[in-house]
Amino acid sequence: MSKDEIRKFLISDIINKVTEYIIEDTGCDITSALSMLYQSPVIKWLQDPEEDLTSKSPAYIYELIKRSSQ
């Protein structure tokens, strides 16, 4: 696997886990959870290699999303 493929895999895994957290906390459906995630500024940070959020846990990233929506 190339570094880019690994990075994409990590992002996908983080998105899946954060989506689960959103659904558990809010009781919303998967579409609403993904919408909440993709409308937050955190998704841009996650996809930016300079930010290196892929080294952080999904729980940490979820906390960033909750704080950015307040």
Image (spheres, rainbow, N blue to C red):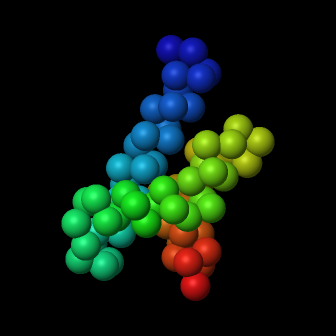
* Residue 48 can be seen, yes or no: yes
Could you tell me which residue is drawn at 59 percent across and 23 percent down? 4
Which residue in the rendered view is the most extreme toward the right? 50
Give the total number of marks visible in the rendering. Answer: 0
Could you tell me which residue is drawn at 54 percent across and 69 percent down? 65
Which one is in front, 43 or 1? 43
Taking 56 as reference, is 24 left or right? left
State the image quarter where residue 32 is shown.
Answer: bottom left
Q: Does residue 17 sit above or below 68 in this rendering?
A: above
Q: Position of residue 42 (x, y in %)?
A: 60, 59
Q: Position of residue 70 (x, y in %)?
A: 58, 85
Could you tell me which residue is drawn at 30 percent across and 79 percent down? 26
Which one is in front, 57 or 45? 45
Taking 31 as reference, is 18 left or right? right
Which residue in the rendered view is the most extreme toward the bottom? 70
Q: Position of residue 64 (x, y in %)?
A: 59, 69
Taking 42 as reference, is 48 left or right? right
* Residue 55 can be seen, yes or no: no
Q: Does residue 36 sit above or below 27 in this rendering?
A: above
State the image quarter where residue 29 is shown.
Answer: bottom left
Q: Position of residue 38 (x, y in %)?
A: 48, 56
State the image quarter where residue 60 is shown.
Answer: bottom right
Taking 50 as reference, is 31 left or right? left
